[in-house]
Every structure is written in C-alpha cells, then in structure tokens.
Image (tube, grey):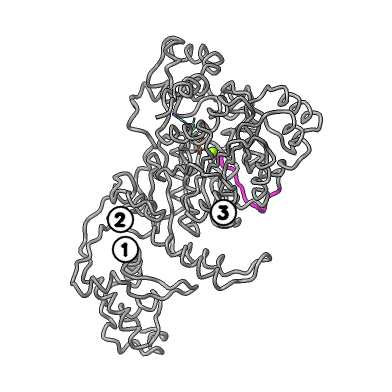
Amino acid sequence: MGNLEKPKLLLKKYFGFDSFRPAQEKVIESILKGKDTLALMPTGAGKSVCFQIPALMFDGLTVVISPLISLMKDQVDSLNAEGIPATFLNGTLKRAEISDRIDAIIAGKYKLLYIAPERMSSYDMEKIRQNRKISMIVVDEAHCISHWGHDFRPHYADICRFVNMFFPRPVVAAFTATATPKVREDIASLLKLQNPAVHISGFDRPNLFFKVLRNIGKNEFILDYTKKHKGYSGIIYASTQKEVEKVHLFLMQNGIKAARYHAGLSDIERTRAQDDFIFDRADVIVATLAFGMGIDKSNIRYVIHYNMPKSVEGYYQEAGRAGRDGEKSECILLYSPQDVEIQKFIITAASDDYEVDPERVSVNMGLLQKMVNYCHTPGCLRHYLLSYFNDDEAKTNCGNCGNCLADTEERDITTEAQMILSCVYRIKEKAGVTYGASITADVLAGSKSVRVRNLGFQTLSTYGLMKGKSVKFIRELINTLMAMGYLGATKSEYPSLFLTDKAAKMLKEKERVICRMKIENKIPKENAKITDASYDESDETTALFEKLRKLRKEIADSQHKPAFMIFSDATLKFIASKKPRSLAEFREVQGVGEKKLAEFGETFLRAING
Ligand code: ADP
Ligand code: MG
C-alpha cells in the first residue's frame, strides 16, 4: 500500500483528525499516484479532504470547479479558518480584487483555487495558465455534467477542453454523491478521464435515522417536533410554494423561529432566508426542493418532508442533507394519500418549458410508485432505500429506522392477500383490462357504488369478500402488498393493478404472507431528542455541551461566520465529553487543527475549567 504518513500529518495539522476514513485513504492514494480518479461517496463521507490534502502536497496549484457561487465562499472561508491558503474567483468580486488575487495566485500564495465553470474560458484563467503550474483539476459535484443528473450545468461540458489546455496534463479528480450508473458513465466519458481509478463507497448513512409517519396531524407533529428541538437546525420540505407559505406561517404564529425559501421569492429574500438558517438565526427553514444544493451546513439535525417527494432519488438526496458532520440526525417523512395526488398533478401538468410527454409521464409515474412503496413498506426503511440504489449487501434489518424500531406485531395476512390478489385477477378476467386500487377496494368491500355496478363487478365472486372492513383499510392492505412486491401498478396517471410473478408464485405454492404491522402510530408521545449513544450523555456533559454551543455562537457572531465553521457539532461533543484541561489535551480533540487550537484553545479551556 502507498505511504500515507505525510497525508496523515497534514490531516492532523490542518483538520485536526487522527485518521482517514477507509474510502478517503483509497482516493487519496490514487490521486497521489497521479491517476485520474472518480470518487462516488455519499454526502458527509468527507470528499473535500480527499482532494484538499493532495492539493497541499502537489507543488502546483489545484483548481476546483464547483457549481455554486454561494458555496464557494463558504468552502474557501472554511479552508482559511483551518489555515489552508485557498481562494476563489467569481463574478461577485470587484475587478481590482480579482487582479489582486490573480497576482497572488501567480506568486504562488495559494494551493487551491475555486472557480465556477463559467470562469474556465476567461482571460483570467488564461493568465493563470501561462504563469502558474496547475497540478490538479478537481471537479466537485461532477454529476452536474450529466443530463441524467438532477442538477445539469451546461458549462460542465467544457471541462474536458479546459483540461486539455494544460501541458503537462494535470491530474483530474471528480467527486459526486450521485449513485446512478448512467450518471457515473457520463462523468467518466464526458470528462474523458484517462484510465481512471473509480472508487465507489456504500451509500449507507449510518447516522441517519429514517422514519415514515402516515396519516397523522402534520401540523401538530411539526410544531411539537420543532419545539422539542429548539436551538437545533432542521429543514422542512414541502412540495409547493403555497404549502411552504402555509407551513411557515403556521410555525411563525406558534413562536417557532422559521425561515422560508422557494422560487417565488426574490433573490434578496432567498439569500436572507438562507443566511438566517446558516447563521442559526432561524432554527428551521421551510422550503421547496429549490433549497439545499447550495448549502454545506454540517449541523442539520433533522429533515422533515411535510409532503412525499416525487422519487426515491430526490428523497435520499434531500433527506441526506441532514447530519453531514456524522452526528445522529433524523429524516422523517409525513405521508398522506393527498401527497400522491399532488405529485401526479405536477407530473401531468404541462409547463411553459415542455409539453406533456407521455413517455416522461410514464417514467415519472414509475418513480413515484417506488416512492409511495417506501411509505408503505412494512420492512426496514434503510434496506428499502439501499436496495433501490442497487446496494445488494444492505442488511434486511438495520435496527435503526422507524420500521425496525416500531412496536410491531407479525401478522399473517395470507387470507387477506389471497382475497385481494384474486379480486385483481377476477376483475381483469371479466373486464379484459386492469383496474386501479380504488375500484378493487370497492369491490372487495361490497360497495354499492354506481361505478361498480356500471362495470358489472357486483357479479364477481370476490364481490363483498371483505365486507365489514372499511375501504380505507383495504386500500392500506393493497398498498402494503404493492410495497411488498405482490402487486404491480401500471405507470400511468391512474395506475391499474396487476399480479406480479411473486404473487403468482405465492398463490401457486400456497406461501404465507407475513408482514410486520405497526401497532399504528398516533402521534408518537415523545418526540425524543436526537442524541448519540456513543457519547457520554450525562447531565453534566450535556450542560457543558450547551454552554460550549453558546460560546461557539458568540465567537461565530463576532466573526460573522456560521457557527459550524468554528467547530462542528461533532467536535463540540468531543470536547464536552473529554473535557480537556490543557492545550496539549485540547490538541487531541478530533477536528481541532493547529490554527484553531491557537485561535480558540484558551477561550474554550477557560469555559470548560472556569
Ligand atoms: P462531502 O463533501 O462528502 O459531503 P465533507 O467533505 O463536507 O463531505 O465532509 C463532511 C464532514 O466530515 C465534515 O464535517 C468533515 O470535517 C468531516 N470529516 C472529513 N474527514 C474526516 C475524518 N477523516 N475524520 C473525521 N471527520 C472527517
Ligand atoms: Mg462536498
């Protein structure tokens, strides 16, 4: 194996960490060997140090292409706070400032330069190219190059040409958290990576706790939850601007410090909302999915989906914004059947940009159904998510999600399943075509509705087979059977049901259908605080943690920086539980590099021991 002694020293010196995570070691090794590298690592895995450490070791400059201007400043500020010479060039700077920076870059004062993709072809870059050696080009958020990704950026297409302007050719390293194979192929081919080392790490986020709550009072829930987590950051995603406004108003009226963010607001309003959230002036930000890509806030403790999103990809991405610092965080989805209707409406609505394309509608309906299934699966939620991303090694029982931990009882639903499946079968047999969940439930319940009679379904042998059960109950069971893979749904606006191979096998071989039924959640009585068992959570430690949080906020405010940029929550917890008594002990804290030790060490020691 390669020699990682030097990188480790740098990791401690600048970032204050004792060791690399396994995935980081591999990526750093291949970059240091001078190989083009493509790294797919989930959010929070620590992609940044994978290129920042090699950048410190190369003799030339490392150019980092990053899609968002807002993010760029934060990233450079963070690096400077660690004592790393980094800067950025973008349109927010004045001309004179740009010239100064270019001079400093040429004089070799910086190891890292962040630029937006639009800058690659600028005169400034040409000047730098002619006067300073470039050792590496990093493409962050590399999925932006792909049409298949969710954040396509046309300028990313020019990166390859940019790279080719340099001689000798710098190492190219691309990073993304997007898992899909299509996007991955696009990155490697469109960037023309040369014989790249590809590193794919598992997509599990062990510190995230996933939970689905169905049919509960959403407002009641979020009010209770945000109150219990006062002082902690969270995002509440809603599916429309109107819904964002409604939820935001509700929280504000009930005394919760909330910001709001959606595309209907002015740039100024959005920037202010984002800043309020990043600087912890607002605990909660209520937002549409327009919010999130541009922020790197590491201490987001929860992400609540007030409405179900349109796809599992989208959900995992949005939920994944919680807990970048590796601390325990919660991802809660509040499901109600109307959410499905909202999404269908969005999918089928024509917009200014494009006509309704039947193929697109059908693809999106398919994605939506997978999301609906997530909300109804009786099995492990993490397993569901990871298998969706083709992670075959995911455990079937993570022991750390809402479904694994719920009070459940194993129920044998074989009889009900047989009734439902045979009803679906009989309907198709009689009508020659398939029908949807609602009419199937009506038939089983023995409904006297006009629709049932018009179709002649009251003569089916399965008519009234589940008489006495409510239509709602039967619908739930149908959803469960879909989530378990016994029933499939056509990919259309009004999906109709069909039996899957799994159902055929089950009926033929008389298999039993066992499902873990939640002893159904009313509102959970305690929205317990999010805590991490791996730390000493004595009252004393918790009190110290809170005290240090206040101190961190004071320092952050006085320096006009976000609190998490001073120390992460993880570092703060480490300090609170280890209670260092000297600078030497403080140096052992994970996340305290030399610069921060010198800058904040004494102040924190006084707070701990004073
Ligand atoms: P990504 O870009 O993959 O989402 P980041 O680079 O923003 O992740 O890092 C996420 C968090 O992990 C940061 O708070 C960072 O300080 C922390 N981190 C990175 N590497 C390590 C490490 N080796 N040990 C402990 N924490 C780390
Ligand atoms: Mg990153």
Residue type of the residue flagged with mark 2 = Gly
Residue 195 position within the rendered picture, expressed as x and y whole percent measured from the top left: 51, 44
Reply yes or no: does residue 283 show up in magenta: no
Looking at the picture, does residue 100 appear above or below residue 530?
A: above
Residue 525 in the image, given as x and y percentages of width and height: 34, 46
Q: Residue 446: image x %, image y %?
A: 31, 81
Label 3 is placed on what type of residue?
A: His
Q: Earlier in the sequence, mark 2 or mark 3?
A: 3
Helix, strand or loop under label 2: loop
Q: Quadrant of the C terminus?
A: top left
Residue drawn at the location 50% of the way across and 56% of the way down: 182
Judge the density around disc 2: few (<14), some (14-19), many (≥20) Cα neighbours within 10 Å: many
Task: Name the magenta segment's main secondary structure.
Answer: loop
Which mark, residue 150? 3
Q: Give the labeled residue for mark 2.
A: 379
Q: Please state, as top left, top right, bottom left or bottom right, where the N terminus lies in the image.
A: top left
Q: Which residue is mark 1?
A: 484
398 left or right of 509 in image: right
Inspect the magenta stretch and tell me whether residue 260 lies in it: yes
Q: Residues within 10 Å of mark 1 (few under 14, many from 20)?
A: many
N-terminal-most mark, 1 or 3: 3
Callout 3: helix, strand or loop? loop
- Residue for point 79% across, 29% down: 99
Q: CA distance from mark 2 to mark 3?
A: 28 Å
Q: Quadrant of ligand 2?
A: top right
